[in-house]
Amino acid sequence: MRWVASAIGLVVVLAIVLLGTRTASANDFFSSSPGPLAESHASLDNQSKCNDCHVDGTNAISDTKCLSCHDHQDLRTRINAGKGFHASPQVKNKRCETCHLEHKGRRFDIMGWKSQGGEKNFNHDLTGWKLNGKHAVTDCADCHKAKNKAGLKVYMNTPTLCGSSGCHADDQPHKFERKDMLRCERCHTESVWKPQKRQMDFDHNDRKDAGMPQLGSHADVACSKCHPKAVFNLPFKDPDNCSNSGCHQSAHDGHIFDSRPCEWCHSPTFKSFKQKYAKDMPFFDHSARTRFNLGAHARLPCYDCHTQKLGKSKPVSACEQCHA
């Protein structure tokens, strides 16, 4: 039975040794771990937190746990949607720890800039937001100003609508009343800010975009002719009534029906009366608006009676003047 007693004694000794080793390991965790965590993970630098990143007490890292922890940036959602840098061909399907190393000390670059050639050499095209013009030479910190809860700089979810938020939020010379108009890229580009783009990315004929349709001759007018000093919130009570717009002074000087809406006879889509007939002016009833009933004259072009001298004198109405 001596060998049984010896075996029991050996088991007791081993148990004491293992317990002591475990206690020593718990008391000396930081010296026995691979090294301190980065500043942003400092709250996890505790033996009880190992499995927050590692798998079942091993040194294996779980990407699922990484993405679960970073859900405040919607990183997993963006990757699944194929958006952003982490969904780019260069990064997709790589393990998180490939670029984001840990246990390298509090000041270690956990962002992984080294794997991308550094912050200044980063290929911004991989994010899906290509830098052009002035943006290509702007310092990163001028656009990326957000910080996380730990006070460290973050790069995701940087505003891209330059007018309504982000970098140019206070740069509003046009004083638009509607927030949906605060989209600088509709008229400007990153390469050419001034003068503005000739063909703008909004429909001037859409009442949701502009208060006045751009028809006929108006389509060829330079923007600055109607919008001096880049003022787009024009004070027109009725922009469809050109005689009240402040743009057109009457050439007829009150000889025709005193002061009447120009659109009774004119429209932006024609430039001459030479080929215009009464039927082409459905808003103007010649018989009702004047004291001259057209009768058979309705088949004549307006210009036969309303010549270029119309601005200075009324057309003759005596029959013998034309039918001598």
Image (cartoon, rainbow, N blue to C red):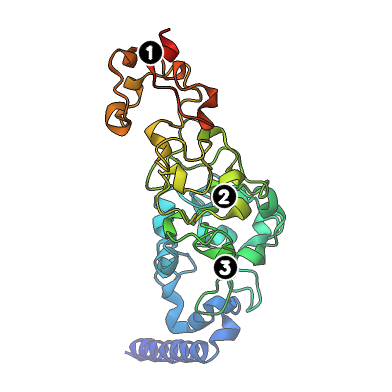
Measure the C-alpha gap from mark 1 to mark 3. 59 Å
The three-letter code of the residue at mark 2 reads His
Residue that carries the numbered disc 3 in the rendered image: 170
- Within-10-Å neighbours for mark 2: few <14, some 14–19, many 20+: few
The location of residue 280, given as percent across then percent down, is 35, 22
The three-letter code of the residue at mark 1 reads Leu
Measure the C-alpha gap from mark 2 to mark 3. 21 Å
**Circle 3 — which element?**
loop
**Circle 1 — which element?**
loop
Q: Earlier in the sequence, mark 1 or mark 2?
A: 2
Residue contact between numbered discs 1 and 3, judged by CB atoms under 8 Å: no
- Within-10-Å neighbours for mark 1: few <14, some 14–19, many 20+: some
Return the mark for residue 300.
1
Return the mark for residue 273.
none
Return the mark for residue 227.
2
Residue contact between numbered discs 2 and 3, judged by CB atoms under 8 Å: no
The location of residue 171, given as percent across then percent down, is 59, 64
